[in-house]
Image (cartoon, grey):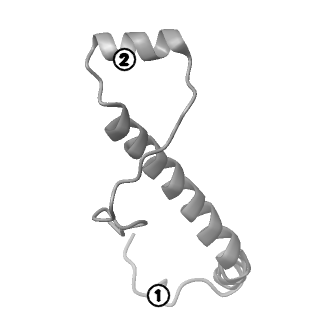
Amino acid sequence: MTMIYNKDAKKKNTNLSINSDLLLKAKEYKINLSNSLEKILEGELRLKEKEKWHNSNKEAINSYNLRIEKDGLFSDNFRSF
């Protein structure tokens, strides 16, 4: 899997505002807020990177799909299924 950020980068303190009841429940279950947020942000970043890749390659993908639709695959004559 491709790294989308430097996991060895120095940690940086930040301030957040979250729902007080949510925070209380997370503390009751000893949920590590920093780790949880990092995992969620990584997932969000992956989605954004996929979307960015798809948008930047949309023209090539559409062109390829049209060519395959018109001409077929080079291996069509070799398949037995």
Examine the rendered structure and indicate whether residue 17 appears above or below residue 53.
Answer: above
Q: Mark 2 falls on what kind of element?
A: helix
Measured as percent of width and height from the top left, residue 41 is found at 48, 47
Occupied quadrant, residue 80? bottom left
Q: What residue sits 33% from the left and 65% below the top? A: 9
Q: Is residue 19 left or right of residue 7?
A: right
- Locate the N terminus by quadrant: bottom left
Q: What residue sits 29% from the left and 30% below the top? A: 32
The residue type indicated by label 1 comes to Asn
Q: Mark 1 falls on what kind of element?
A: loop
What is the crowding at mark 1: few (fewer than 14 residues within 10 Å), some, or many (at least 20)?
Answer: few
Measured as percent of width and height from the top left, residue 22 is found at 48, 14
Measured as percent of width and height from the top left, residue 54 is found at 63, 69
What is the crowding at mark 2: few (fewer than 14 residues within 10 Å), some, or many (at least 20)?
Answer: few
Q: What residue sits 35% from the left and 54% below the top? A: 11
Ranked by sequence position, the earlier of labels 2 and 1 is 2
Occupied quadrant, residue 62? bottom right
Query: Is 53 or 32 nearer to us in this picture?
Result: 32
Instruction: Return the residue found at the far bottom.
Output: 74
Occupied quadrant, residue 16? top right
Query: Is 75 or 5 nearer to us in this picture?
Result: 5
- Locate the C terminus by quadrant: bottom left
Q: Which mark is residue 26?
A: 2
The residue type indicated by label 2 comes to Ala
Measured as percent of width and height from the top left, residue 7 is found at 31, 62
Examine the rendered structure and indicate whether residue 62 appears above or below residue 7.
Answer: below
Q: Which residue is disc 1 drawn over?
A: 77
Discs 2/1, front: 2
